[in-house]
Each structure stands twice: as C-alpha cells, then as structure tokens.
Image (spheres, rainbow, N blue to C red):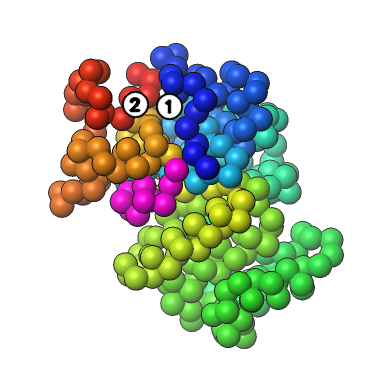
Amino acid sequence: MSNEPPTDSGLSADGTSGVASDPTARTAAALVVEGITVAYGPAEAVRDLSLSVNAGSLVALIGANGAGKSSTLAAISGLVRPRRGRVLFAGQDVTRWRSSRRVAAGIVQVPEGREILATMTVHENLMLGAWHQAQGFEAGVQEIYQRFPILGERRALLAGSLSGGEQQMLAIARALLAHPRVLLMDEPSMGLAPQIVDEVFAVIERIRKEGTTVLLVEQNAQRALQAADYAYVMETGELVLEGPADELLANPKVVEAYLGESLSGEDGLEGRSFDDGDADAPRRTSG
Ligand code: ATP
C-alpha cells in the first residue's frame, strides 16, 4: 500500500499536513504529526515538522546523524513532549498521553541501540515485553519462538551474549509482543553487517506485509528506501523532501546526497537549490 497522500500538495506551504486537515484522509492515516517542534532547553532538535503515515504502509524517515529523526520518534512515542504541534493516532490527539498509554493503544517503539537487558535471558526479556498483557503472554512468547526460531534456540542464554543481529531480532520480537498497530523503529540496521541488515529488513518487510504500519528511522538511506512505500528526508531539524520511496531512490539529488560514495552524513541536501520545474525532483516540503 502506498503512503502517498491523497492530495497532490503533500505538506502545504504553511507546514500543516493536507492529510491531517482532511477528515476522510485522516482515517486512512494511522499516524499524523502536525507541526511539531522538539527542543532540549534552548536547542530545537525538530522544527515545525509534519508527516503522515498511512495505515498498512512502511514509511521511512531518513537523514544524517543529528538531523532530528530520533527526536521525532520520541515525540510520537511520548518519550518527549513536543514544544509545539500535535501527534494524532487513528484520528485521536495523543500529544498529551503518557508513553505507556500510547503503547497500550498500539504505538510501540523499537529503541535505537535495542535496549535489551543484557544480564537477563532471552526468555526473560521476552516475558518482560509481554508483561502488560492480562493473559496469554506465555502463548505470545511461544508464537515469537515459532516466528524467530533462533530466539527459541537461544532462549536460555543471556541476551548480552547474542550477536548484534540476534539482539536486534530480540528487540523487534519484544516490541511485537505489545501488539503494535504502528511500529516505530529507530536505526534497526545500526552496527550490523550487510548480510544481517538484509535479514533484519526481511523481518521488517514481513511485519508490514502482515498489516502492521511501520515508521522506520534510518541512516542507511538506500536500504530504507528500498523497503519503504513513502519517505521523508530530514536535515537539521526540518523536513526537506518527501515522496514515494522509489522516486527518491531514483532521484539523482538524493543519490548524490545520501546514497553516493561520498555519503558521509554531513553532505546533505540543505543549501542545494532545487529547480521547481524539475520533474525529476521529489516534492520539496514546506519552507
Ligand atoms: P542520530 O542518528 O545520531 O540518532 P537523529 O537524526 O536521530 O541522529 P536526534 O538524536 O534526534 O537526531 O538529535 C537531534 C539533535 O538533538 C542533535 O543535535 C542532538 O545532539 C540533540 N539531542 C538529542 N537528544 C538530546 C537530549 N536528550 N538532550 C539534548 N540534546 C539532544
């Protein structure tokens, strides 16, 4: 399913989402972020950012180190309160909800760095992931072992002894036990060998095929764009581009800034001029 907004305009010039202001479209959007600003003291990590994620789609948020991707996810999952703007989930304003209430409603994050409990076993980590379910969590964990046989094999081992890829699978599995409707993933490929990255992405794509909406934050732009339906590009706290992922993947300017050999994270799109008449150029967002 495509995440393409139902209007051609995408994000409007005033920074508000055309999707969010259309009540019909809002039903299709699992998640709408409207003009959020996230600040840590005086420093604004995210400025006036709007995006939407259609139900059932896989949307990527890409950008260099420090662009504000994790801060955006934190505002969606409730780990930080945005200074301005709103977060809507299935049409409901959840901006002031605590993160535990958001998890119960189905907004579940796989944190950057996995945050598994290294000195507990794989099984204990999974049981903790399922703790809030009133019943059936043992069955849920058994289902996870069927889905991720490697975790079943390693169930009695300390989570800290797993490989990086296995730890990432464990973090994803733990999030799945919370029955996400929208799964937020922060840099799942971080620090993994290319072959393991492929495995992790295969899992992500399967999760999406099974009907879970996914918002994926990645510095690995190529891999993220290959998997996603739609993508947003962030630079220094702001969205600078958005479009169908295959279009961004084919766009020479994105290739040059994020996918080329010189990909360093510092050499972004900011400051580059986009010719408005350039049919190949992906849509430029507000600003
Ligand atoms: P990375 O890939 O490194 O995680 P990112 O795109 O996810 O980058 P953020 O982690 O959101 O970016 O960081 C955006 C900016 O906010 C950075 O300048 C960062 O130093 C700053 N920042 C992030 N978290 C905090 C915090 N808790 N306190 C103060 N500044 C922060």
Please give the name of the residue rendered at 44% of the width and 71% of the height, measured from the top-left corner.
165
Residue kind at label 1, given as amino acid type? Arg
| Position above or below: 287 against 73 | above
Q: Residue at x 48, y 79 (%)?
A: 162
Residue 237 in sight from this viewpoint: no
Check the image and name the residue furthest to the top: 14
Q: Specify the amino acid type for callout 2.
A: Arg
Q: Is residue 152 visible?
A: yes
Q: Which residue position holds label 1?
A: 47
Q: Please tell me the numbered disc located at residue 240.
A: none
The vertical placement of 219 against 190, above or below, is: above
The front one of 150 and 119 is 150
Q: Secondary structure at mark 2?
A: strand
Mark nearer the N terminus (2 vs 1):
1
Q: Residue at x 60, y 33 (%)?
A: 29
Residue 261 x/y as whole percent: 15, 52
User: Which residue is label 2 attached to?
Assistant: 283
Q: Is residue 129 magenta?
A: no
Residue segment shown in magenta: 219-229
Describe residue 261's horizontal placement relative to residue 43 as left or right.
Answer: left
